[in-house]
Image: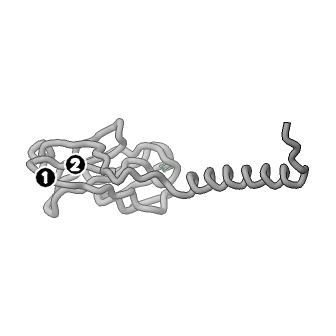
């Protein structure tokens, strides 16, 4: 068996640990990006009522259509993450009572940030909410 000097063995061990931890650190700091868009929901344009909304409970989002076109809001409350409910004129959180307007802006707290607006793409008679 080869006799490796103790200092060289320590150096190789440290180098191996450094490379392994560097790889983990890079993987943690740089999110994976496949470069592909992820369609969360896709519906026919005609399925979204003018002035109304479609709710997608599993995806926790709502797709709205108003005079400005389509837009989507995350239904995850910006206070502590409960799912907000959509009413005719506002969105409200059942957990602590935050209220948001239909554009997602805070009407009353405790939430202090607007609901997240999600990316919407319209094509070929369909509207997609992408993440
Ligand atoms: S989680 Fe919505 S108000 Fe607290």
Which quarter of the image is occupied by the N terminus? top right
Q: Which numbered disc covers residue 128?
A: 2
Spot occupied by residue 53 in the image (x, y as percentages of width and height)? 22, 47
Q: Which numbered disc covers residue 123?
A: 1
Instruction: Give me the residue at 15% from left, 46% from top.
Output: 48
* Label 2 CB less than 8 angstroms from ligand 1: no
Q: Which image quadrant is residue 57 in?
A: top left
85 sits left or right of 124 in the view: right
Instruction: Give me the residue at 52% from left, 49% from top.
Output: 80
Q: How many C-alpha atoms fall within 10 Å of the one at disc 1: few (<14), some, or many (≥20)?
A: few
Q: How many C-alpha atoms fall within 10 Å of the one at disc 2: few (<14), some, or many (≥20)?
A: many
Along the viewing direction, whichever of 13 and 124 lies nearer the viewer: 13
Along the viewing direction, whichever of 9 and 97 lies nearer the viewer: 9
117 sits left or right of 32 in the view: left
Q: Are marks 2 and 1 in contact (CB under 8 Å)?
A: yes
Spot occupied by residue 105 in the image (x, y as percentages of width and height)? 36, 62
Task: Of the two numbered discs 2 and 1 on the same chain, state the one appearing first in sequence.
Answer: 1
55 sits left or right of 33 in the view: left
Q: Secondary structure at mark 1?
A: strand
Compute the Cα span from label 2 to label 1: 8 Å
Spot occupied by residue 103 in the image (x, y as percentages of width and height)? 29, 60
Position of residue 3 relative to residue 66, above or below, is above
């Amino acid at each position: 068996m080869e006799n490796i000097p103790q200092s060289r063995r320590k150096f190789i061990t440290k180098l191996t640990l450094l490379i392994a931890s560097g790889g983990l650190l890079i993987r943690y700091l740089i999110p994976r990006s496949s470069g592909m868009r992820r369609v969360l929901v896709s519906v026919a344009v005609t399925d979204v009522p003018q002035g109304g909304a479609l709710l997608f409970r599993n995806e926790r989002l709502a797709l709205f259509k108003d005079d400005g076109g389509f837009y989507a809001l995350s239904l995850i409350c910006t206070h502590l993450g409960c799912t907000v409910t959509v009413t005719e004129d506002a969105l409200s959180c059942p957990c602590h009572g935050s209220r948001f307007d239909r554009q997602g802006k805070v009407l009353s707290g405790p939430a202090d940030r607007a609901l997240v607006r999600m990316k919407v793409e319209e094509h070929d008679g369909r509207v997609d909410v992408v993440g």
